[in-house]
């Protein structure tokens, strides 16, 4: 039976504790104290002792100490007067003092040193030590004088001292408790004098100024929760990321140390690794409060691995508190739920008889499993080469093993992971078989998979196996994502499904912002390896729209490679990567609840809506009720939830894609148009809200897609699209005023809302002077926000290469004819810190053959009149929008 109330420190922490009276952190104690005082102390301190402003009594006592007298104050003055290199050098003062006059003298000298202040003068940018005095208000002292090294050394030596020597030190220190700082230092050195500790708690040092530097000593002197209560609000910021220090506080206070450690974990401006140390300490404390403090930080990347350790340390407490934390739908509750499920698997005895064990599936018998999952090749004895060859010929590729069988890390515990169901969904793989599957996963590398996983896929339920695969990946991430176990990501490409894709794609998009660019690139490989319509859809989405430029470029390379393999352009591949999501021929979906049915449709932005049996539109699909058929209603509700997520992923990208196709005048064959637009159950909801142009035999006809998927012209007459026609999206610049007005009436009559501005799009025109010129002077000299310049990138603009100072001095947009429209920026956008220079002056707006600053151009004679009316209108619209942001 595990005692969940005892504080048990692991060896890595106990090694930093010392057998003590009250808990001593282990200092670096050598074989013995220094044999003699380092040379040169007399000469080094004499200029300070001879200063005209030096207190004569302190100078006398220092010289007496140098002459051999056991004067603690004199020893402290000498140490304060020494240059830093000599004072803090090898050995430090403690061993010298102990060697000269004993350990009790060293303790008294150290207490005196705590109230000595060096006085400096500043001249010519240099600081010069003039004299030493007793500490006064406002005096500042070097950090090393707060005793973190020498104080710990002295406390350790006192702990090792015999009773007689220790009693002598305590008796001597009684005379050196005159100030708050001295009282804290003395209590730190002899923490078993609880009466002295209680005096410090009753009148603690200030949390400001010089006294604040000694709070860590007081916290190490506390011996019970009663001391902490007497202090009131103790400063957790005083605890450094030092395991020995924290272990001392924990051993003195026990579970009562939790609030201090919690506050220490919140210290601002500390390194991630320093933040981890107090969190590690919380995971060691045997209390609900400490465990709850970790749960409060469950979304922090350092915390889940520590929670796993605490779960093993306090299994009953973990079961109870994780169960409460897992309630709800928040991200934190989801992580707690994952940990809870893993905990139940790893500690079945704790969870026995609870609701957490409900629905447990029986294990399959070994006789019902392939030999690979019972006794895999790597667990059989290695015979002669001939025997090995014979085994390979007999058993096939599953016996071809890597030279070194990878061993999954300790985090990959099959007992903590979900059970893998067999195809009948009535039996599950035994834990030992699941461990073999983990070993097979660990053999996965990009482009190479252990053939045994094909056997696993044959005998296991696909959904259950994909769930197991995702749980392995999640468990790897929750345990800090050890790089040596990167196979946990790679294996998703072998065992993952569309559900895996939906969960992985957001992780890939976020990884670069978390310092995981390399992981994000490997994630793209996983999406390509899964290779389903949904996987390629998400891959294409990342290639077209993600905020991290490097990841977007890598995804574009992937898409181009896949397109090339299929003999397509990336754009034409994009047409084919919109899944139908199981929608019916009408572009909708019927969801059956048994007594009730609902129809799903889509608006102009591909946002799904629901109508009930009476045709009334509802805000959302209702949750299944008591009168509904649970076997029908619950899967239908889950299907709608998944559909909303999938379509949300697609929607914005498809609207943007079609608007860009209109601007770029992309063309499709009549067959492609029929398949990927008019005939596509999802895209048709956008396509039928646009006006299209058909080019055939020198004639251009405008048409739309009617509700019944037939085509109609502006007069609402049926239109027969010729098989040889090319189709494009109409731009208003291509339609005269009368035609635009007529189409506007048609769309108004049918109450058709457009997914992006088309019929109502403003047409911009170049003036005669601008057509003949190479610059657009109407936009020059305008001051705009830097962020507005960056937002031009939504329309295909791209900032120039950074100069020597990291400033991007222009932005440009390619236009037909191999030309670029370029905007010179002054002073330029600071790369990596857009808001660093908040405003930009549009210095020059010009057209040329390459994007450079205007003054560096070499070509001449290019004019804006070379732009076609559509391109000119779009460029002017974008620049007009930019100019409209001017303050």
Image: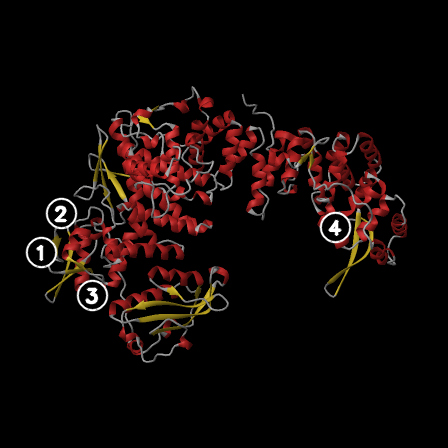
Q: Is residue 501 above or below residue 860?
A: above
Reading the chain from its start, which is encountered first: label 1 or label 2? 2
Mark 1 Cα within 10 Å, few/some/many (few <14, many 20+)?
Answer: few
Give the label, 3 or 4, closer to the camera.
4
The alpha-carbon separation of the residues under discs 4 and 2 comes to 88 Å
Marked residue nearer the N-terminal end (3 or 2): 2
* CA separation in Å, label 4 and label 1: 93 Å
Looking at the image, tell me whether mark 1 or mark 3 is earlier in sequence order: 1
Where does label 1 land, which residue?
720
Residue drawn at (82%, 33%) of the image: 165
Say what secondary structure mark 2 lies in: loop
Residue 153 placement (x, y as % from top left): 73, 41
- Label 3: few (<14), some or many (≥20) within 10 Å? few
Q: Closer to the camera, 710 or 173?
A: 173
Quadrant for the C terminus, please. Answer: bottom left
Q: Nearer the viewer, mark 4 or mark 1?
A: 4
Q: Position of residue 664 (x, y in %)?
A: 26, 63
Q: CA distance from mark 1 to mark 2?
A: 14 Å
Q: Which residue lies under the disc numbered 3?
A: 734
N-terminal label among 4 and 2: 4
Judged left or right of residue 329, residue 562 is: left
Q: Which mark is residue 708?
A: 2
Q: From this viewpoint, is residue 655 visible? A: yes
Crowd band around label 4 with a 10 angstrom C-alpha radius: few (<14), some (14–19), many (20+):
some
- Tell me, yes or no, if residue 620 can be seen here: no
Give the mark, 3 or 4, whose residue is nearer the N terminus. 4
**How many angstroms separate mark 1 from mark 3 (CA)?**
21 Å
What residue did someone put label 4 on? 88
């Amino acid at each position: 039976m595990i005692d969940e109330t005892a504080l048990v420190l692991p060896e890595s922490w106990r090694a930093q504790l010392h057998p003590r009276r009250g808990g001593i952190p282990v200092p670096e104690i050598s074989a013995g104290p220094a044999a003699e005082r380092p040379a040169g102390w007399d000469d080094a301190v004499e200029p300070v002792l001879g200063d005209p402003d030096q207190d004569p009594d302190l100078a006398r006592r220092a010289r007496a100490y140098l002459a051999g007298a056991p004067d603690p104050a004199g020893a402290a003055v000498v140490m304060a007067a020494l240059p830093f290199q000599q004072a803090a050098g090898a050995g430090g003062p403690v061993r010298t003092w102990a060697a000269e006059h004993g350990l009790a003298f060293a303790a008294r000298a150290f207490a005196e040193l705590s109230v000595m202040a060096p006085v400096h003068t500043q001249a010519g940018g240099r600081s010069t030590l003039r004299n030493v005095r007793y500490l006064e208000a406002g005096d500042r002292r070097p950090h090393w004088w707060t005793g973190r090294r020498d104080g710990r050394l002295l406390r350790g030596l006192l702990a090792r001292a015999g009773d007689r020597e220790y009693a002598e030190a305590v008796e001597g220190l009684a005379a050196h408790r005159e100030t708050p700082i001295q009282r804290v230092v003395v209590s730190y050195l002899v923490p078993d004098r609880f009466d002295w500790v209680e005096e410090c708690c009753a009148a603690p040092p200030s949390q400001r100024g010089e006294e604040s530097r000694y709070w860590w000593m007081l916290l190490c002197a506390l011996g019970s929760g009663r001391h902490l209560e007497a202090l009131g609000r103790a400063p957790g910021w005083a605890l450094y990321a030092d395991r020995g220090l924290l272990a001392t506080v924990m051993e003195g206070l026990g579970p009562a140390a939790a609030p201090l450690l919690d506050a220490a974990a919140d210290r601002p401006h500390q390194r991630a690794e320093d933040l981890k140390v107090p969190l590690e300490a919380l995971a060691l404390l045997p209390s609900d409060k400490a465990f709850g403090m970790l749960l409060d930080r469950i979304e922090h990347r350092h915390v889940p691995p520590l929670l796993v350790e605490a779960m093993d340390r306090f299994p009953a407490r973990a079961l109870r508190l994780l169960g409460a934390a897992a309630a709800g739908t928040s991200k934190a509750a989801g992580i707690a739920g994952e940990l809870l499920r893993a905990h139940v698997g790893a500690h079945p005895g704790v969870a026995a008889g609870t609701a957490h064990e409900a629905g447990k599936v029986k294990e399959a018998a070994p006789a019902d499993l392939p030999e690979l999952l019972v006794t895999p090749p790597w667990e059989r004895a290695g015979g002669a080469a001939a025997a090995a060859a014979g085994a390979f010929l007999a058993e096939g590729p599953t016996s071809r093993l890597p030279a070194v069988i990878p061993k999954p890390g300790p985090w990959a515990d099959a007992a903590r992971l979900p059970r893998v169901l067999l195809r009948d969904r009535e039996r599950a793989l035994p834990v030992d078989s699941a461990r073999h599957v983990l070993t097979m996963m660990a053999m996965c590398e990009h482009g190479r998979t252990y053939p045994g996983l094909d056997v696993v896929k044959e005998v296991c339920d696909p959904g259950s196996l994909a769930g197991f695969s995702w749980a392995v990946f999640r468990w790897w991430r929750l345990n800090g994502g050890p790089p040596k176990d990167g196979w946990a990501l790679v294996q998703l490409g072998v065992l993952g499904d569309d559900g895996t894709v939906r969960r992985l794609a957001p992780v890939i998009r976020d990884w670069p912002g978390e310092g995981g660019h390399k992981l994000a690139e490997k994630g793209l490989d996983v999406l390509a390896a899964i290779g389903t319509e949904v996987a390629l859809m998400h891959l294409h989405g990342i290639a077209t729209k993600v905020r991290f430029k490097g990841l977007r470029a890598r995804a574009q390379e992937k898409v181009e490679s896949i397109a090339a393999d299929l003999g397509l352009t990336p754009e034409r591949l994009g047409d084919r990567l919109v899944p139908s999501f199981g929608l019916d021929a009408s572009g909708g979906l019927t969801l059956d609840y048994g007594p009730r049915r609902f129809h799903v449709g889509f608006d102009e932005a591909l946002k799904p809506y629901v109508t009930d049996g009476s045709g009334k539109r509802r805000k959302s699909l209702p949750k299944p009720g008591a009168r509904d058929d649970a076997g029908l209603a619950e899967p239908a509700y889950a299907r709608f939830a998944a559909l909303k997520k999938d379509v949300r992923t697609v929607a914005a990208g498809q609207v943007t894609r079609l608007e860009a196709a209109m601007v770029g005048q992309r063309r499709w064959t009549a067959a492609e148009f029929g398949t990927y637009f008019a005939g596509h159950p999802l895209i048709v909801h956008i396509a039928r809200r646009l006006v299209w142009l058909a080019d055939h035999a020198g004639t251009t006809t405008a048409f739309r897609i009617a509700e019944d998927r037939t085509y109609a012209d502006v007069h609402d007459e049926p239109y027969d699209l010729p098989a040889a026609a090319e189709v494009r999206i109409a731009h208003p610049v291509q339609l005269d005023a009368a035609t635009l007005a007529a189409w506007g009436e048609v769309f108004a009559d049918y109450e058709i809302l457009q997914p992006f501005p088309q019929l109502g799009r403003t047409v911009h025109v170049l003036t005669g002077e601008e057509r003949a010129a190479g610059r657009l002077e109407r936009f020059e000299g305008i001051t705009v926000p830097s962020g507005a310049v960056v937002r031009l990138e939504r329309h295909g603009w791209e900032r120039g290469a950074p100069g020597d100072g990291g400033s991007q001095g222009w932005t440009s947009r390619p236009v037909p004819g191999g030309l670029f429209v370029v905007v010179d920026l002054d002073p330029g956008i600071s790369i990596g810190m857009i808001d660093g220079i908040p405003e930009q002056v549009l210095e020059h707006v010009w057209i040329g053959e390459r994007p450079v600053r205007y003054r560096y151009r070499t070509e001449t004679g290019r004019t804006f009149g070379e732009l076609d009316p559509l391109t000119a209108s779009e460029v002017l619209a974008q620049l007009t929008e930019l100019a409209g942001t001017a303050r």
